[in-house]
Structure formats: structure tokens, C-alpha cells
Amino acid sequence: MNDPIYLDGFATLPLAPEAQAAILDAWSRPGNAGSPNAAGERAARIIADGRAAIAALIGAAPDEIIFTSGATEANNLAVVGAARALARIHPGRRRILMSAIEHKAVIEPVRRLEAEGCSVTIVPVTPTGTIDLEALRAIAGSDILLASFMLVNNELGTIQPVGEAAAIIHEAGGSIHCDAAQALGKIPVDVFDLDVDYLSLSAHKCYGPMGIGALYVAAGAVKPDALLVGGNQQNGLRSGTEPVALIAGFAEAARLAHSALGTDPLHGERLLSRLLDSLRERQLRVTLVSGDADRVPGGAAIAIAGMNGDTLSALLGSQVAISTGSACTSGQIRISHVLEAIGLSEQEARSVIRVFCNRYNTEGEILSATDHIVAAASRCALATGEVRQ
């Protein structure tokens, strides 16, 4: 059986062959960076080179990069670890801000801080899925400890005005964290322009391996309290033996992303436009959920009138890999909090699918995916009882 045409790039991206080669090469030669021998020195060099490569991709200094197991851990370290450290310095500040469309890897750490006595304010978003800066200005105050705003939303693909938000938070005296997992390698990311204190990254969202991520901690920012303690690796901020092979793969993916920032976005957006045009030519009523908001090239949330996204995804099954914004919570299917936040009704939200056209997709795949989606949509409409003309 052939693999499905892969358009689920918001969930994860294919592993770049060059990153896979780097992983296998590192795995072929054992070495612990903490060992005082040649093998340990080689491992330490791989880690140092990896830290430099990832720093270069976001405009940071190598010593501002802390390796983690992924963006979830990086978000926890930045949100919980930084907030705890900041609270000791600023005991009068106890308010945490986050947008209404954050990933659960930010929402849950924020809720943990709420249980520890912090107050939480949710910043609303516009109907097209970007942070409402006017609302943020009205909300901002001298009690803000930390704010967390993602750079690219994982369901809508919308690019958030993090730089403008950071200016508002810093003017109020607070610190700011940015979850940039969905942005890395898809759009330029520069920590100087964003002016954030902490920034989370994930390798598998930019053609690297799963199981490795990083947290940027600005040189002038308060260092987060460690959540993992043990061997005091990475200056005590994240103990644990560094996964040398995964770091090598992350580094190679970062180097590739740096060189492909001029071509990948154009390629992805061209394919997405081809997909949308082809679906409309086949009489499907398709709209972009985010309207005219800036979004990551090649990626979008798409509403198909009269369709149920979950049913459509299931019918496509082994032919085309797409996903929806639905989430299973406590055994019940409910619509995504992101789609709720932008004001979609339950019926509208259930018609939404998300797609991302990646570096390795071809136009032939897009045309084939169109055929499969149209055929599945026809079956979906009949299954849900839509009247056929």
C-alpha cells in the first residue's frame, strides 16, 4: 500500500533526508558529552555545533539556547520555570497573560500557575485569528508577571503580532514568552525583532526529528527555575544527558531551513493555492477560515461548506493525510477552543480541516489529493444527508 499524500504538516513535517543522515552518523559513534575522552569531546562538539546552528536560525547567541525534549517541555520550562523565578524578584506581580488560541502545551502550564496562586487573563483574538492588540493594551497593567503568545497558530496558520505585543508587555514591566514551534523554518524568526525574553522551538515542525526541541532564554532575561534536576547539564537549567544524535538532526534541519527560507514558502503557497483553486473548480465551496490575515505560507484552516471535517478526514484515510481542529476531551468530542475563540458556531467549526503543503510535496500530489478529497466529500455529503442537486 502506498503512503498517503501527506498534507498534515501542522502536526509534524517529514524528516529531511539530510537530517536523517546526520542522526544516523551520530548514532553510529557512541559518546557522552560529559565524558573526559575523545568520544565525549566529539559528542560535545556536535552539541556545540547544533546549538550554534539553531541560534543562527533565530538570530540568537549559542549560549542562549537550551535543549529540551521538545516544545512542550520548552513551554513548561519557560512558563512555569520563568514565572516561579520572576515571582521571587517581583512579588507584587502575580498575573499571567495568554491568548485565547494558545496550544495546550502553554494552556496547561498556565493553569498550573493559576493553581499556585497566580491570576490568569485571557487575551481575545480577532475573528480572523490574531491577537487583539487594542484589547491587550486595555488589559496590560503593572501586575503582569509573564505573558505567553504563540508566533504561528497551529490550527489556523495565522501569524501573530508578537513584536507589538512584546512592546506592550515590556512597557508594563512584564516578561514575555513566545511559542514559535509552528514558525521555525516556515517564516523568518528573529528574536531581536520579536524582542521576547523566552522562545520555544521544536525540531519536528521544521523537518527535524521528534523528541528534541529548544528554549531560547535571552541573555538579559531572568533564568527559569529548572524543572528537571540531576547532573547539572546545560548550566543546571535542564539536567539530563544530551541526546547527541537528535541534536545533530535538529542542527541539520536548522541549517537546511536557513538556506530554504527563500524557496520553501513560495513552493508551499503555490501548492496551497493550486489545491484551493482545484477544489473550487470541482464545485466545492471552500473558504479560508483566517480570511485575509497573515498566515504561514503553505498552511491554512479550510472550511468546506456542507462537510464534516472529522468524517472527511476518516474517509480519506490512507489516501490523503489531513486533520481537523477537533480534540477529544474527557471522552467527548468537542470543537477546538481555537475555532470557538474566533467565533465559529459548532456547525461551522465542524466543517474545518487544516492542511500544510510541505517542502517535498509536488503539484502532481496536489492534483491527486484534489481527486481524493472531492470523492470523499461526495461520500461525506451523502452520509450526512445533504440534498444532492
Image: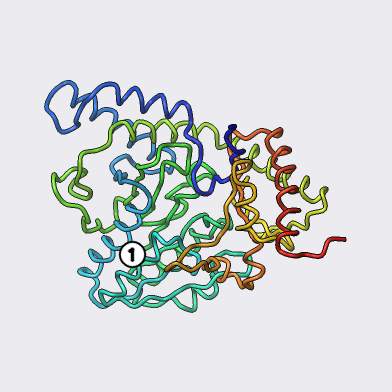
Q: Which quadrant of the view contains residue 105? A: bottom left
Where residue 162 sits in the image (x, y, percent)?
Answer: 49, 59
User: Looking at the image, can residue 177 be seen?
Assistant: yes
Where residue 274 sits in the image (x, y, percent)?
Answer: 74, 42
Q: Is residue 59 left or right of residue 279?
A: left
Q: Is residue 56 left or right of residue 44?
A: right
Residue type of the residue flagged with mark 1: Pro
Image quadrant in which the N terminus is located: top right
Q: Circle 1 sits in a helix, a strand or a loop, which is it?
A: helix
Q: What residue lies at 42% left-to-right and 57% top-to-bottom? A: 178
Q: What residue lies at 54% left-to-right and 43% top-to-bottom? A: 186
Q: Which of 110 and 278 lies nearest the eye of the viewer?
A: 278
Q: Which residue reaches farthest right?
A: 389
Q: Which of 38 and 55 lies nearest the eye of the viewer?
A: 38
Q: Which of 131 and 273 lies nearest the eye of the viewer?
A: 273
Image quadrant in which the C terminus is located: bottom right
Colouring chosen for the image of the structure: rainbow
Vertical position of residue 92 compared to residue 3: above or below: below
Q: How many marks?
A: 1
Vertical position of residue 113 compared to residue 76: above or below: below
Q: What residue lies at 72% left-to-right and 44% top-to-bottom? A: 275
Where residue 280 sits in the image (x, y, percent)?
Answer: 80, 51
Vertical position of residue 28 compared to residue 386: above or below: above
Q: What residue lies at 42% left-to-right and 62% top-to-bottom? A: 104
Where residue 60 sits in the image (x, y, percent)?
Answer: 37, 44
Q: Is residue 195 left or right of residue 240?
A: right
Q: Is residue 87 left or right of residue 51?
A: left
Q: Which of 333 and 341 lies nearest the eye of the viewer?
A: 333
